[in-house]
Amino acid sequence: MVPHLTTALTGPLLELERCFLDRETRIEHWLRAQWQEYVPPFYTSVDLRNAGFKLAPVDTNLFPGGFNNLNPAFLPLCVQAAMSAVERICPEAQDLLLIPESHTRNQFYLQNVARLANILHHAGLNVRIGTLLPEITVPTRIDLADGQHLMLEPLKRLGPDGRRLGLEGFDPCAVLLNNDLSAGVPDMLQGLHEQSVIPPLHAGWHARRKSHHFAAYKQVAREFGAAIGIDPWLINPDFEVCGKISFHERTGEECLAANVDALLAKIRAKYREYGVTEQPFVIVKADAGTYGMGIMTVRDASEVKALNRKQRNKMAVGKEGLQVTEVIIQEGVPTFETVDDGVAEPVIYMIDRYVVGGFYRVNTARGRDENLNAPGMSFKPLAFSTGCSLPDMAQAPDAPTNRFYAYGVVARLAMLAAAVELEQTASDAVAA
Amino acid sequence: MVPHLTTALTGPLLELERCFLDRETRIEHWLRAQWQEYVPPFYTSVDLRNAGFKLAPVDTNLFPGGFNNLNPAFLPLCVQAAMSAVERICPEAQDLLLIPESHTRNQFYLQNVARLANILHHAGLNVRIGTLLPEITVPTRIDLADGQHLMLEPLKRLGPDGRRLGLEGFDPCAVLLNNDLSAGVPDMLQGLHEQSVIPPLHAGWHARRKSHHFAAYKQVAREFGAAIGIDPWLINPDFEVCGKISFHERTGEECLAANVDALLAKIRAKYREYGVTEQPFVIVKADAGTYGMGIMTVRDASEVKALNRKQRNKMAVGKEGLQVTEVIIQEGVPTFETVDDGVAEPVIYMIDRYVVGGFYRVNTARGRDENLNAPGMSFKPLAFSTGCSLPDMAQAPDAPTNRFYAYGVVARLAMLAAAVELEQTASDAVAA
C-alpha cells in the first residue's frame, strides 16, 4: 500500500531549510494568522524550483491535475483537508458537480479526475461529473487503464430561466472546476448566481495573469521575510512584464530585450551578493495560460532579438491556440535536484490550507535551467515518501522530511499569494 | 516507518458495516451538519466494543492518554487536525501550556505526553509542560525509555492577583489538560478567567458522569438512527443508574439488583429480536472516574447481592482513592475480535472533529465479556494499519479499511455526544 520511493535528495545544503526548521513555530503561527484574513483556494498545486541557494515557486495552479500522482498513503490527509474545504463551501448540502478538462483521451488526467472524485466522495459528497464536451449528449462511461471508470454526463441548465447548472436529475449546491478555462468562460457557466462556482470564474486562465500572482507573491514573500527574518529574494523569483508583444509581427521586441537585460542585471547582482557562480537566466512565457507552451530560456537579451520563424511561432501560440501578446519575464531558478540522471522539480499539492502531498516531476530529456512541464514531453512523477508537516530537528536539514517541510512552507506562501490575488482580481471582475 | 501490523479482523459479518458503507455520504453529511451546531472537544478517545451483532462505545475519554500507541504513519493526520483545533482555541497566539497526569514513572504515559507535545509543536505552537506535582519545584528533565526526554516545569500563577497560569517566563494563551482531574480541581487551576482551559474544567472526572454522557449518546444514536435508517440499539449500549450506593455499608443493593434485573430483561428481549444466542450481561462501574477500577461483569441480579468483602472493597474505591457512591449499570457488549488468542477492543483517537487513528487493546488474560482496561493488567496496543476515512465498496464489509471506517463513525457519534454533554453540563457548572 505504501510505496517506499527514493527521493531526489542529493545536493548542496540549503541554508534556508535549516532556517525553516529553526523557526517552525513562528512560520506556522504566521501562516495561521494569514488564514484568519484570507480565504484559501479550494485546492492548489505549486511547481517549485530548488536551486540550493534559492527555493521559489515558478507556477501556481488553481485547477490542479495530478492528484493521481500523490502517494496513496496520503489519501486520508486529502480526505481530511477536503472535509474542511467542504464545510467552507457547502456545509449544508451534499451534491457537488465536478467539471473536468475536456481531454477524454488523456488517461493520466482522467485518473486525476477519478482520484479527485474519490477524495470528495470520502469527504461526504455525492459527486457527479459534468463535461463541457458537446459530443457527450448522454451519460458516457469512460474506462480507465487502471480498471476504474468515470461517468461523464452532459451539463444542463436547471430551474426557472435556467439559472442553475446541473445534470439530468442532479441539482448541485456547488460546482467545482477542474478546468482552467483557458478558452474563456463557456456559455454553460455564465450567469450562475445561485450556486458557488469554485474556484471563481476569474481564476480561469482567460482572465488570470501570472504577473498578478507573482506581484501578490512578492508582497507575501516580503512580509514573510520580515516576520521570519530572511531575505525575501531567497524565496522570490523576480519578474518583469511586457504587455504588447506580437511574435509574428515582431513588435514589442525592444520591451522584451530591455526587460531581459534589466532582470539579468538584477539577478547578477544578487548572485554576486550570495557568491553564486551559476550563469543567470530568465524564463520568457505567456502571462496568461499554462501547460508549458511558449516557454523560452534566455541567457542574454540578444537571444530574444534573433528568434527564427520556428521559435517565434512556438512562442506566439498558447493553450487552446490562443495568441500570446502579454509575456512575463521571470527570473530563472535552476533546479539542483536529480532523480535517475533526470532533472527533477517538486510539485506540492494543497487542499484548503493544508499540504496534502507532493511529487517530483522528473525529466531525463531536459536541462536544469529548462521548463520540465512541456506538452508532449514525458515526465515521470515520483511521489514523496513522507509528508510535509513533520520536520525533524534531529535529522539533517536536507533529510527528506525536512526538505519536504521547506517545500510545503514555500508552496503555502504561493497559495497565500493566490488567495490575495483572487481577492484583488475579484473586485476587478465585478468592476468590469 | 510504516508498520504493517495484522489486525483483529476475523468474525461474523457485521450487517452494520455494510450499512455504513452504503450510506457513507449520508453519514458524513449528517455529521457535517452536527458540527455546524456543536463544538467538538479538542481531543477524544473512544473505547468501542464490536459484538458482531452490535458496535457500541463503552467509554469516551476527554483526556486521551495513548497517542503513543497510534501508527506513526498517521502523524501527519494528527498534525493537520491539530492545526484545525488550534485555529479554534487560539488563532492569534502561539504559546500553549500542557498539563499532564502526575505519573512520572509510567513510561507509556510519558511517551504519550511526548507524542502529544510533538503533534502540537508541528501544528505551530510553543508547547511547554507544567506539572501539578508539588515535588517538582524547578524544571526537571525526565528521560524516556525510547531516547526522548520531557521537561516538566512547576506551574506558577502570573499577572496581577495571579489571574493567569503559566511557568517561569511563559505566559500561555491556553492551557491544555491531559489530566482528568479525578481528584478534583487543584487550587492552581481555579479562577482562570483570562485563559482558555481545554477541555473545560467541568469535563474532569470530579464532575463528569458516565450517565450524562450515555444519556447524550442515546439521543445522538436515536437521531443518527433516524437519519440513516438503522435501529439505534445496534450502536447504543443501554444503561441504568443507582445514585446512593455504599459498597462498604451494603446500602443501595436493592436499587442495584432491581436495575440489573430490568436491564438484563431489556437486553434479553433485544437478543431475541435479533436472534442473538449469547448470554446477556451488564457491567457495573462507578458513574464518575476512569481507569477501569471498580468494574464488575454481572450476569444475574443475585450476583450483586452476594458480594464478598474483597469484591465490595474493590468496587468501593475509584481512582485517587475516591469512594464510589454512584454507579452506572451498562449493557455489556461482548467483543468478538481477537488478536493472537487475546481478546481485543478497538480504541479510536480523534483531534477536533477528525479521526486520526486507532489501536486495538489486546488482553490475553481476560474474557470477551470483561473490561480490558484494568490497572496493573498488561495490555498490548496494536496500531491500526490503515486509516478510518477510506471505506472501499470494492472490498468486503469486514475488510480492515471498511471495519475501521465503521469504528470511526461510531467513535465520532460518541464524540458528538461528548460535545452535547459538555454543552449541557457547562450551564450546570455556571449555575452551581
Image (cartoon, coloured by chain):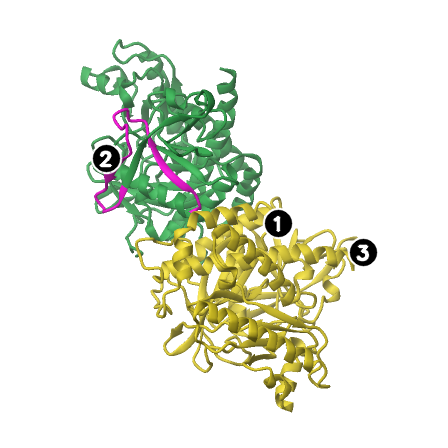
Chain colours: A yellow, B green
Secondary structure of the residue carrying tag 1 is: helix
| Amino acid tagged 1 | Ile
Which residue lies under the disc numbered 2?
A: B106
1 vs 2, front mark: 2
Asked if marks 3 and 1 fall on the same chain, the answer is yes
Say which mark, if any, is on residue A89: 1
From the top left corner, tell me how far across and down residue A266 is, in percent: 56, 71
Check whether the beta carbons of the residues at disc 2 and disc 3 lie within 8 A of each other.
no
> Disc 1 sits on a residue from what chain?
A
Of the residues under marks 3 and 1, which one precedes in the sequence? 1
Residue B395 appearing in the image: no
> Disc 2 sits on a residue from what chain?
B
| Amino acid tagged 2 | Asn
Which residue lies under the disc numbered 3?
A: A161
The one nearer the camera, A98 or A432, is: A432
Say which mark, if any, is on residue B426: none
Please give the range of residues in magenta: B123-149
How far apart are the alpha carbons under marks 3 and 1?
A: 24 Å
Asked whether A154 falls inside the magenta stretch, the response is no
> Disc 3 sits on a residue from what chain?
A
